[in-house]
């Protein structure tokens, strides 16, 4: 199970920048997320909050968090980091009950990206030696 204590605002902004550069459909396809998370609003644009948090977890830890791991608590994590996540009015009024989700399926729109090793200290991509050029 993923914990999101290592995910910072900067990791989330990195995921948003990647979403912008790839485009929404390719971003979701590369990482295997289905569309439909609550909208994360940032600088006038809307993003899939589940996918953004899952990829931000990858930037923070080197491991992608699945949609099941992000779950419904992902909105609270994003709000704590200063982001606006909106929930539809019907969801806000509905009683809280456990939700059983079908396993996420990969979309075949884009080839999966090779996950690069990331320095745990400065969050830079590590060279082939595995030793950070900045931190040593």
Image (tube, grey):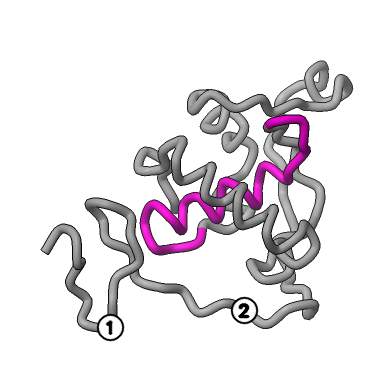
**Residue denoted by label 1:** 128
Image quarter in which the C terminus is found: bottom left
Residue 103 in view in this figure: no
| Label 2 element class | loop
Disc 1 residue crowd, few under 14, some 14–19, many 20+, Cα 10 Å: few
Q: In this view, does 24 lie above or below 94?
A: below
Q: Does the magenta stretch include residue 60?
A: yes
Q: Is residue 61 magenta?
A: yes
What residue is drawn where x is 68% and y is 59%? Answer: 21
96 with respect to 83 (left or right): right
Q: In this view, does 58 lie above or below 112?
A: above
Outermost residue, front side: 134
Q: Percent from the top left, x then y, of residue 90?
A: 88, 23
Q: Percent from the top left, x then y, of residue 96?
A: 71, 25
Outermost residue, right side: 90
41 with respect to 67 (left or right): right
What residue is drawn where x is 75% and y is 67%? Answer: 26
Q: In this view, does 59 lie above or below 111?
A: above
Asked where in the image residue 19 lies, by quadrant, the reply is bottom right
Q: Nearer the viewer, residue 6 or 100?
A: 6
Q: Is residue 112 above or below residue 103?
A: below
| Label 1 element class | loop
Disc 2 residue crowd, few under 14, some 14–19, many 20+, Cα 10 Å: few
Which comes sooner in the sequence, label 1 or label 2? 2
Q: Percent from the top left, x then y, of residue 70?
A: 57, 46
Asked where in the image residue 106 lies, by quadrant, the reply is bottom right
Alpha carbons under labels 1 and 2: distance apart: 20 Å
Residue 53 in view in this figure: yes
Q: Give the range drawn in magenta.
A: 43-64
Choose mark 1 or mark 2, whichever is in front.
1
Residue 112 tag number: 2
């Amino acid at each position: 199970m993923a914990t999101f204590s290592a995910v910072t605002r900067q990791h989330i902004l990195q995921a948003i920048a990647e979403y912008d550069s790839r485009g929404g459909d390719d971003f979701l396809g590369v990482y295997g997320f289905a569309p439909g998370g609550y909208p994360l609003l940032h600088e006038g644009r809307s993003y899939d909050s589940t996918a953004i948090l899952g990829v931000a977890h990858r930037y923070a830890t080197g491991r992608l968090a699945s949609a099941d791991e992000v779950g419904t608590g992902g909105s609270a994590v994003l709000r704590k980091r200063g982001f606006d996540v909106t929930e539809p009015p019907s969801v806000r009024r509905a009683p809280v009950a456990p939700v059983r989700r079908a396993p996420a399926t990969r979309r075949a729109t884009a080839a999966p990206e090779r996950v690069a090793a990331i320095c745990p200290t400065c969050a830079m991509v590590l060279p082939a030696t595995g030793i950070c050029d900045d931190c040593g």
